[in-house]
Image (cartoon, rainbow, N blue to C red):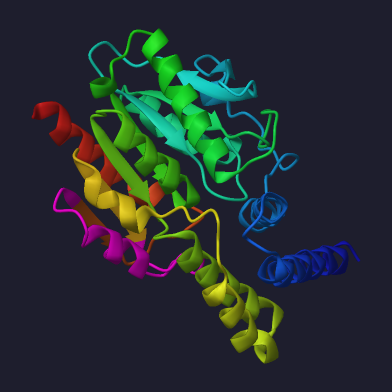
């Protein structure tokens, strides 16, 4: 019975997204009210904060995970988890993906601890223990706030590595344009929100058998006039620091062709395409990240 209830909720969730996408098409984009409602519709489409699905803290982190409270310039209270690096090692500012929270990536936190790197895992506004409601501009402000916290701890921009996964690739790239960071790591990145939406909805169509709506949904996404674009494809060419892009070829949520496209736009990119990786598991990434970081330190 519980299984069927969960399936029903998922169907309802996807259908709600579809109706909001149709409404988004009908909203005027030429006046303040229309733009306001458009952004509200997009925030519902783009963000699905996991507030209640929280993973229990692993014992390896209980002695080293430091909860941190941050306040943004627009007065939103954020939560983050901090790990002090070993002396002389950089610190990683981690941006999670859509429909995720930082407790899902405790293994990544543990990985960074094992190799001596520091970490600040940021919970965007509206996610986990952070207040507010998410938006594209909002999570960029959150990222700036996290950088300011690291500066307050004595780090310079050149001590900081940005790690963004999936949708988190957008604040990682945006932040790297403002600060002279040491490097950027993009795990299963999106090219832009339209390409990401096409990828994710094609998966929903397969799972929920919406074959009859396939072309209609594709048309809705492709012709939508988005106010928030998460345009990594237009920004990445301006990133000056070393970039590591990793993507699994069998990723069913965000297709790896998006990583290929991003990599082609910047000569500083080291591209890794993994045959047996996964969108929802990061263990396959760790050897590549370790190698990338060791070479950064040596240089």
Q: Position of residue 204 (x, y in %)?
A: 64, 73
254 or 218, nearer to the observer: 218
The mark total stands at 0
With 130 as the anchor, is 151 left or right in this view?
left
Residue drawn at point x = 67 percent, y = 33 percent: 56
Residue lying at the far right in this picture: please name it: 1
Residue 114 pos. (x, y %) = 35, 27
Q: Which residues are magenta?
A: 248-269
Relative to residue 269, is residue 213 depicted above or below?
below
Instruction: Name the quarter where the N terminus is drawn.
Output: bottom right
Residue 14 percent across, percent down from the top left: 73, 68
Q: Residue furthest front?
A: 31
Asked if residue 105 is positioned above or below residue 150 in the image, the reply reads below
In this picture, residue 224 sits left or right of residue 271: right
Nearer-the-camera pick, 149 or 112: 149
**Residue drawn at the location 28% of the way across and 50% of the way down:** 236
Residue 264 included in the magenta stretch of the image: yes
- Quadrant location, the C terminus: top left
Q: Residue at x 41, y 9 (%)?
A: 152
Q: On screen, 136 above or below 207?
A: above
Q: Residue furthest left?
A: 299
Instruction: State the image quarter where residue 127 is shown.
Output: top right
Q: Position of residue 213 (x, y in %)?
A: 68, 86
Q: Quadrant of residue 212?
A: bottom right
Q: Is residue 283 magenta?
A: no
Camera-side residue of 109 and 101: 101
The residue at the point 54 percent across, 45 percent down is 136
């Amino acid at each position: 019975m519980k299984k069927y209830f969960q399936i029903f909720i998922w169907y309802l969730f996807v259908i709600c997204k579809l109706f909001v996408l149709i409404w988004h098409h009908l909203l005027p984009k030429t006046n303040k009210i229309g733009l306001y409602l458009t952004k509200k519709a997009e925030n519902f489409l783009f963000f699905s904060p996991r507030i209640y699905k929280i993973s229990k803290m692993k014992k390896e982190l209980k002695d080293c995970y430091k909860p941190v409270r941050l306040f943004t310039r627009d007065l939103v209270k954020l939560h983050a988890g901090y790990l002090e690096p070993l002396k002389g090692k950089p610190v990683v500012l981690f941006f999670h993906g859509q429909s995720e929270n930082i407790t899902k990536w405790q293994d990544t936190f543990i990985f960074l601890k094992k190799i001596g790197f520091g970490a600040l895992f940021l919970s965007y506004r509206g996610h986990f223990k952070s207040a507010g409601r998410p938006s594209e501009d909002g999570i960029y402000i959150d990222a700036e706030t996290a950088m300011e916290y690291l500066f307050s701890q004595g780090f310079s921009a050149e001590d900081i590595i940005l790690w963004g996964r999936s949708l988190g690739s957008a604040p990682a790239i945006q932040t790297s344009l403002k600060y002279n960071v040491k490097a950027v790591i993009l795990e299963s990145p999106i090219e832009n929100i339209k390409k990401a939406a096409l990828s994710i909805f094609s998966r929903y169509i397969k799972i929920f058998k919406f074959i009859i709506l396939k072309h209609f949904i594709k048309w809705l996404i492709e012709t939508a006039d988005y106010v928030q674009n998460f345009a990594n494809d237009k920004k990445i060419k301006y990133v000056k620091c070393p970039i590591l892009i990793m993507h699994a070829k069998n990723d069913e949520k965000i297709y790896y062709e998006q990583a290929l496209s991003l990599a082609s736009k910047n000569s500083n990119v080291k591209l890794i395409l993994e045959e047996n990786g996964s969108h929802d598991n990061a263990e396959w990434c760790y050897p590549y990240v370790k190698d990338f970081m060791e070479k950064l330190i040596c240089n």
